[in-house]
Image: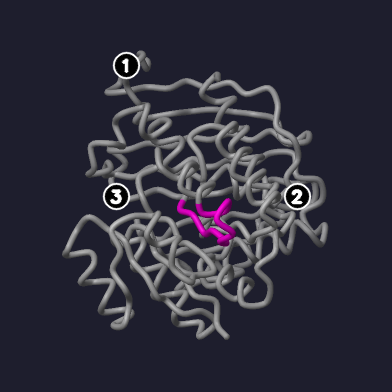
Amino acid sequence: MKPRLGFLGTGWIGRHRMAAMVATGAVEAVAVCDPSPECIAEAANVAPTIRIVDSLDAMLALDIDGVVIATPSALHADQSIQALQAGKAVFCQKPLGRTAAEVDAVIAAAREADRLLGVDLSYRHTAGMEAIASLIGEGALGDIFAIDLTFHNAYGPDKPWFYDPVQSGGGCVVDLGVHLVDLALWALGFPKATDAHAALFAGGQPLHPGSVEDYASASFNAGGTNVRLTCSWRLHAGQDAVIAADFYGTNGGAAFRNVGGSFYDFTADHFTGTAAHRLTDGADDWGGRAAAAWATQLAQSPRFDPAADHFARSAEVLDLIYGR
């Protein structure tokens, strides 16, 4: 029997992840909860027989095996813990928590419940980053001593809660930087991070209490690798987005970069001296792969996967950047 899933939050991302999971054929979408009738209607297009419920409590009372969470960030940790304590597996949008303490609490709940925990860190599943991670793992680049990470989004979030630090946990760093930090740590095997330094700005001025950053530059040490990060909302960058992860090793380099300002299309290259070898290029439908992978894993076993401990590493880096 296929695992039965409830979907908490069915905005664009929630619906997209629902479709990716259903498409695997490994799971069944059986329940949905969202305050928007329009979002409910769109979800029903993906899964026509889905049952509508009005709360997480009502969802957990159903015969389901897992909950997929795509709600505002302030709710992620508490909702994940509630679902896990009810014996349900969880797949959550990033960030899993606003702070490392919240993330640690979710991981502890998953371990205690012995239930699978996943987070939608989707960039790991791009063909380009998978190719670069393979190069690093094989030792083709030698010792990685530096990584440069960039994510400039020419637009800002359109929901008010993103701009309330209590609800969001921060600005562009927790929204965009979390993906980049995860990519760096994932490629390196999740070393402990130390020695973080950051400059955070809002509207071109140093960040002040009660606001969230729309530009950040930061650096930290990850197991001996110097990692530099810049990210922003609404930067005058001349295109929709600038997204890059550049890896520099003693025997070579590699670059993961978006194409022509796209949020979705990437190239990956392997550098040796002045020579460049294209690893991946062209269309790559990667957005739902993290969700699909979790659904497939759940169908194989609902039990806790110790790899979930790695979610704490990027949360610790964000705490260092924010100085908390």
Question: Which of label 3 and label 1 is nearer to you?
Answer: 1
Range covered by the magenta-colored residues = 83-93
Reply above or below: 189 against 279. Answer: above
Q: Earlier in the sequence, mark 1 or mark 2?
A: 2
Q: Residue 48's image quarter?
A: bottom left
Where is mark 1, residue-wise? 205
Are the residues at dot 1 and dot 2 in contact (C-beta closer than 8 Å)?
Answer: no
* Disc 3 residue type (three-letter): Gln
> Which quarter of the image is occupied by the N terminus?
bottom right
* Quadrant of the image containing the C terminus: top right
Q: Secondary structure at mark 3?
A: loop
State the CA–CA distance, disc 3 to disc 2: 32 Å
Residue contact at pointers 3 and 1, CB within 8 angstroms: no
Q: Which residue is mark 2?
A: 189
Q: Nearer the viewer, residue 305 or 120?
A: 305
- Give the mark, 3 or 2, whose residue is nearer the N terminus: 2
